[in-house]
Image (spheres, coloured by chain):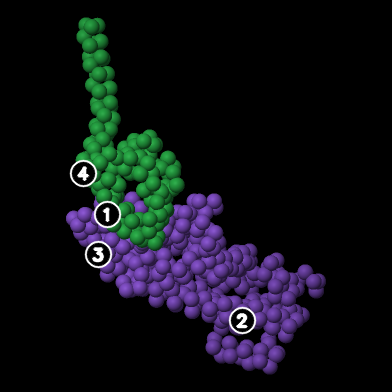
Amino acid sequence: MSDHEHRIKVWDIPTRLFHWLLVVAVGTGLITGFISPEWWMGIHIWAGYGTVLLVVFRLVWGVFGSEYSRIETFAFTPGEVIAHLRELIFLRPLHYIGHNPAGAMMIFALIFFLFGITISGLLVLGGEENQGPLAGVISYQVGDVAAEVHEVLVFVLMVLISLHIIGVILEMRLTGENLITPMFNGHKVIPEGEVASELRSSKPLLAAIFLFAFAVISGSVLWALSTMPPSGIIQLAKNANYTAECGDCHEVYHPSLLPKASWAKLMKDLENHFGEDASLDQGVTDGIAGYLQAHAAEAWDTEASNRFSKVSSTTTHQITATAYWKRKHKDIGAEVFKRKGVGGKVHCSSCHLDAASGRFDDQKIKIPEQ
Amino acid sequence: MKTLKNTIAIAATAVLFSSVSSGIVVAISTRDTIIKDFAVKAGAPLSAERGKALFETKAGGGKPETPSCTTCHGASPMNTGKTRAGKLIEPMAVSKTPERFTEIKKVKKWFRRNCKSVLGRECTPQEKGDFLTFMSSK
């Protein structure tokens, strides 16, 4: 027998491509989720959509792919899994041409958690950020819970990824088989005496049809949902006096950035308005006060309104002095606020391009360079 | 026919010109009326010099954040000022901002608030008149 006959193609191109694209998508998701600034949220979201598509592809390919890509070839019974784990403990694992039972368990776990992470991520996006296809159906409260779940699942995922890498190294050491090169070139060298089963080829057309059907169905469902207006964002009627009188001295702040009680107190003491007399005619004052009461934080369900509705009216009416505001801006240096294009902390709209709508989307943050 | 056309053209020009100029005249006359009104109430002649001094004084007695008019309006009325919250304020000098002091409601509102902020009290008609005389001379 020549060497050539010992080499067989185990991992087809789509499976290999899937694996490495998933590494890129998940890696991008992890990096943008953990360490990158909020205005990179767009990339994080696309990493999520990419992950879902890849995982769905893998499931379809698990039915229509070539021999060792098929789920049935690595759907082991619990007994087989336990037996393999026992072999691992005694450091004498049997050799498998395709996925071994431990690897198979890892695949199922990864798929499960990746689905959980992307679904919870979509809930966070729709609930907390009021974006994405679920913006119209998911409340901030639900999004807030989903954010916790999202985080926990990601930590589990990182444990799984670590175990996956450790497992590969361990199996390579114990069996002496190179598992990494086949993930690039697709070929494995079969040990003397081991017989590969009949190698069924893939059915790309069927796979494409199923993938296409999935894309069309899920795409239209998400599109239909995304046509719903985002929940908790009301069309803010302009108040001429509020815009003119308050806007004379400072930015016209969105009413959702303080709770009712704070606006009421602030409007009662315009003679002492942050170190200046800003008093107005009683009629004008009452009109503005009424407008602010009707559109205060409590009337909205955005991230900002949910956070600022918790501001106590006895501590401060200065939005930039609230604990939440300070925490959100703690990484922005004093020199940034001094830039001409920013003009101080008082100018929300210098960096938050959507400040006037009250949304304050992460992707709408553009800090002027000068 | 030609003469009719010319007449219409001349009439239209006249109407246009007079409406624009009357707008300016009205602006000037309202400001003058406002200043004269303060002079009458003060019962004494107005002085641009005193107005300048008032604009620049750091009298104390007001809020610590606003010791002087110049805190927000800048050292010269010819220049653009800036509120403490970062909004630009058009120059106070009438030569730079012709529509200044032509609306009695605005004049009253800002004197009431800003005198309280800077001086801690309402301004007298004499002070208001002096101030506007100074700004009109600039």
Residue A135: % across, % down? 36, 63
**Do marks 4 and 1 share a chain?**
yes
Q: Residue at x 23, y 16 (%)?
A: B11
- For discs 4 and 3, the disc positioned in front in the rendered view: 4
Asked whether disc 1 touches disc 3, contact meaning CB atoms under 8 Å apart, the reply is: no
Task: Give A17 or A21, whichever is nearer the viewer.
Answer: A21
Q: Residue B122's mark?
A: 1
Task: Give A147 or A192, whichever is nearer the viewer.
Answer: A147
- Classed neighbour count for the residue bearing mark 3: other residues with Cα under 10 Å, few (<14), some (14–19), many (≥20): some
**Do marks 1 and 2 share a chain?**
no
The secondary structure type at the circle numbered 3 is: helix
- Classed neighbour count for the residue bearing mark 4: other residues with Cα under 10 Å, few (<14), some (14–19), many (≥20): few
Q: Chain of mark 2?
A: A
Residue topped by disc 2: A163
Q: Is residue B77 above or below residue A38?
A: above
Task: Give the side of residue A177 with respect to residue A129, left or right.
Answer: right
Task: Give the side of residue A271 with respect to residue A26, left or right.
Answer: left
Task: Report how far apart the C-alphas of labels 1 and 3 lie in the structure.
Answer: 20 Å
Task: Give the side of residue A259 with respect to residue A350, left or right.
Answer: left
Q: Which color has been applied to chain B in this rendered view?
A: green
Q: Chain of mark 3?
A: A
Task: Report how far apart the C-alphas of labels 1 and 2 lie in the structure.
Answer: 76 Å
The secondary structure type at the circle numbered 1 is: loop
Q: Give, as a three-letter code, the residue at label 3.
A: Lys
Q: Give, as a three-letter code, the residue at label 1.
A: Glu
Residue topped by disc 4: B41
